[in-house]
Amino acid sequence: MSGRSFAQKILSRASGCNAEVGETVVAKVDLAMSHENAALVSTKFKEIGAEKLWDPSKVVLIFDHRIPANTVSAAEGHKTVRRFAEDEGIANFYCHGEGICHQVLPEKGHVLPGSLIVGSDSHTTTYGAFGAFATGIGATEMAAVWATGELWFRVPDTLKVRAENEIPDHCMSKDLILRAIGDLGADGADYRCVEYVGGAVDGMSVSSRMVLSNMAIEMGAKAGVCFPDARTREYLASRDATGGEEVFSDGDLVCDEHIIDCDDLVPLVAAPHSVDNVHPAAELSDLCIDQAVLGSCTNGRLEDLHAAASLLRGRQIPKGVRLIVVPASREVQLDAMEDGTIAALMSSGAIVTNPGCGPCLGAHQGILASGERAIATTNRNFRGRMGSPDAEVFLASPLTVAASALTGRITDPREVMG
């Protein structure tokens, strides 16, 4: 008989029953996150007749997609959420440009291993990097969670992505996840819990693991987990994040497995208009770019800014290219200012904006015009994602984005690495 999976164990604990794959359980939620779409959630909350939050201490609200407000409509939405947070006594409300939700929540110590976390944003899967079962839900579902603290879940099957050997110096975890998505397809992990394992994952920083969990949704996954270890514990301790319980799949779990040998990994790019349209960067070197974006909940952390600065320091971006740098949080931006990274990027010609989601979703701070081409460290390249539906978005690692900004065309970073 096969052992039990991480997902089964989490949902069994949260539901109080023996959760079997394929069954539907009603589970108690440990943490619920919403960003600006909390305005819509609050409307649904009232429509279902709810009178108060089940537990304000377990609700986190944050403004990140359109901060500062970029339209009157956005400003009105912010106003609605501020009023709701005050009325409901939500103490965990980050409304002054603290950064992107998926970066800020771990920084503030809200994410704990073994917890069940839901967020009204599809990339809530990011928190799986800390050993949590984390998944995105819709506004109506979130309204139900706010009212009851519970939600139904179908217990997902498990897919292991095993990454062996070390990631080469010219590659990053973004290249590994693009390789996995390219291999498996945009629906290759539909409603599965992806477990990232193997020597390459063991050797990664917490920030690099967040990239893997963040983009699990891009192959259809319900959740994407990296199991806790000494690095995870060190990070959590530095954030005074106490509690939680480390949960692991049983060693005799039988499930599908996809193996990637990182010795063969090369810098990769996801071409328009699908994240699984993956090619070696070197094969696209004849494509010129208008804009490069370094940031997002996928790759806007300090190690990402460091990687880009390592290529750009002392060099100049050509006038025909716009490099937009969007730190993932205020903390990341301050650290990058203190260690000279921001100065290096700006000296090379980069535009540095306030922390937030901005250009990733085509809201502001770098919208593309028709016929323009961008390369970005973001997580989606769907048609119209970053502006005009007649623009093109290519996804890549911070190293590849920086190299491309430097040459004005999609570039394998090995071309320009010293």
Image (spheres, rainbow, N blue to C red):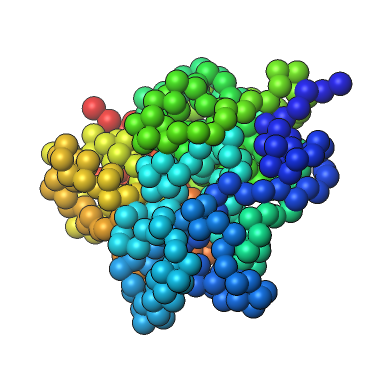
Quick check: 285 left or right of 18?
A: left
Residue 339: % across, % down: 16, 37
| Residue at x 32%, y 50% (from the top left corner) | 329
- The quadrant in which residue 255 appears is top right
Res 306 → quadrant: top left
The residue shown at (36%, 36%) is 239
Asked if 183 appears above or below 137 in the picture, the reply is above
- x 27%, y 30%: residue: 417
Task: Look at 58% across and 46% down and name the residue there.
Answer: 30
Q: Nearer the viewer, residue 248 or 328?
A: 248
Q: Nearer the viewer, residue 101 or 298?
A: 101
Foreground pick, 381 / 391: 381
Give residue 299's position: percent from left, percent from top: 39, 44
Residue 334, x across and y down, in percent = 21, 46
Relative side of 114 to 85, left or right: right
Q: Quadrant of the N terminus?
A: top right
| Placement of 154 over or under 130, stated as above or below | below
Q: Is residue 176 above or below residue 297?
A: above
Can you say whether 248 is above or below 347 in the image? above
Q: Which residue in the rendered view is the most extreme toward the right?
A: 1
The answer to whether any part of residue 392 appears in the image is: no
